[in-house]
Amino acid sequence: MSDPSPTPPRSSDRQLRVTRLAACFGFMVVQLDITIVNLALPTLANDLAADIFGLQWVVDAYTLLFASLLLSAGAISDRFGARRSFLIGLSGFLLTSAACGLAQSVTQLVAARAGQGLFAALMVPSSLALLNHAFAHDTAQRARAMAVWTASGAAAAAMGLLLGGALLQTLGWRSIFFVNLPLCALGIVLAWRIAETPRKADRRLDMAGQVLAVVGLVGLIGAIIETPRLGFDHAVVLGGFGLAAACAIAFAIAQTRVAQPMLPLALLRLPNFSIALLSAIAISLAYYGLIFVMSLYLQQFAGYTPLQTGLAYVPLTLAFIAANLLGGRLLASRGFRVTILSGLLLCASGFAWLGRLGDGDSYLWILPAFLAVPAGMGLAMPATTTMILASVDRSWSGTAAAVLNAVRQTGAALGVALCGLLLADAVRIDAGLRIVCVVCMVGLLLSADLSWRYIRDGGSA
């Protein structure tokens, strides 16, 4: 898609640094809360008397609201300005993080987590739009800025596992939410110093599409989570799947009948746009499914403490950051197709290795998978982000960013729900782990095949 939008005035080096730092802080707190909760699940089960299904809702309430509201959040960012949306998101996330830390029941915690997801949805597309606007003059710098942004979020996600382990053993589970407060405060201070982006005052919010997206995703994820407890033939489960299907059809029809849809279907006809979405959902489903399953495996099957589990995840952080930074160079030299394909295949190889894990195998057997999976993600994720934004007009950057991140969070929610379903049907957690690895590997390989066939390199950035 061509980019006829006028080029914005060039930002000073200082403004570029502040913009990049503020965007990274916002993405860090969002990603931190996706992973840190997984480590606390056994503790939450004891302190709040929660069963496995309640724990799945604690994890997925966040990602569900995050995913389903991202599309409208992108339109809000385009219409009212990325800086304003970013500040509202950070402030709301600070307040709902405090509410999570003060929760006295699973119901209260799930509600507060849903609030976190709402404000996270405002932050992510607006932070990407800020970067896309600030670095519009130099595609190579923009690619590097996206790589740093992605690396900061991934580092926070992995750091959440290590930090969460330390906090859980010293200060209790409430501290894993209170740790967000100073990070949000610092991000707010930085964001006040950023210039506002141009506003697209004629952008309208697609409320019908938004309602259908929320109801459909809740129906789908809820049905998957409740299947082990109620059975597939239960009315609630069948109703959830039916509701999801009906909402999906109605959503597609609705998007063709409104002047300003929340998901312009024309974007899906762009090969690079569509393949980037498929790659993103495959990677997110696999990675967050892995974190969910391995957190339970290490603590409940292998006997690790929360801190030991957090330490076991350190290689994921290091591998992701290293590959993420190298991925920018690979993208600049070899283009989208080679970079994304390499990442998907490397990620799939990690699941193939982990699927052979047997009784009595030490952490040294797990380590290669803990290096290959995040390294593959580190190569593919910044490339998919850059490819999405390069395929659309800059005036649609907020919406495009929202679509990409909605797909990523949908993948994360599906990963937790599907892996919980597979674990519930397995005789033992180690048997369930092997099934999860096979499913994730197949999904990644299918995505790799489509990437090889259909990605078109019109430049490296």
Image (tube, helix red, strand yellow):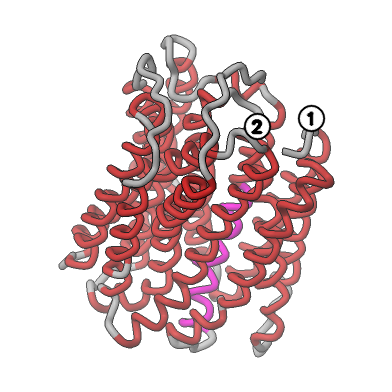
Q: Is residue 286 magenta?
A: yes
Residue 311, image x and y in percent?
Answer: 53, 83
Q: Nearer the viewer, residue 272 or 199?
A: 199
Disc 2 secondary structure class:
helix
Which label belongs to residue 322? none
Q: Is residue 325 visible?
A: yes
Going from N to C along the chain, the mark reached first, 2 or 1, is: 2
Q: Nearer the viewer, residue 6 or 182?
A: 6
Q: Which residue does the numbered mark 2 point to in the structure image?
A: 390
Chain part drawn in magenta? 282-301
Disc 1 secondary structure class:
loop
Along the horizontal axis of the image, is 365 left or right of 243? Answer: right
Q: Residue at x 44, y 85 (%)?
A: 307
Along the horizontal axis of the image, is 325 left or right of 58? Answer: right
Q: Residue at x 80, y 42 (%)?
A: 335
Q: Is residue 182 above or below residue 300?
A: above
Q: Nearer the viewer, residue 19 or 424?
A: 19
Residue 142, image x and y in percent?
Answer: 62, 42
Q: Residue at x 75, y 71 (%)?
A: 353
Instruction: Verify CB contact (< 8 Å) between mark 2 and mark 1.
Output: yes
The local crowd at label 2, few if under 14, some if 14 to 19, many if 20 or more residues have their Cα within 10 Å, is many
The local crowd at label 1, few if under 14, some if 14 to 19, many if 20 or more residues have their Cα within 10 Å, is few
> What amino acid is found at the position of numbered circle 2 in the picture?
Ala
Residue 228, image x and y in percent?
Answer: 43, 58
> Which quadrant is the C terminus positioned in?
top right
Which label belongs to residue 458? 1
Q: Nearer the viewer, residue 123 or 48?
A: 123
Q: Is residue 436 above or below residue 261?
A: below
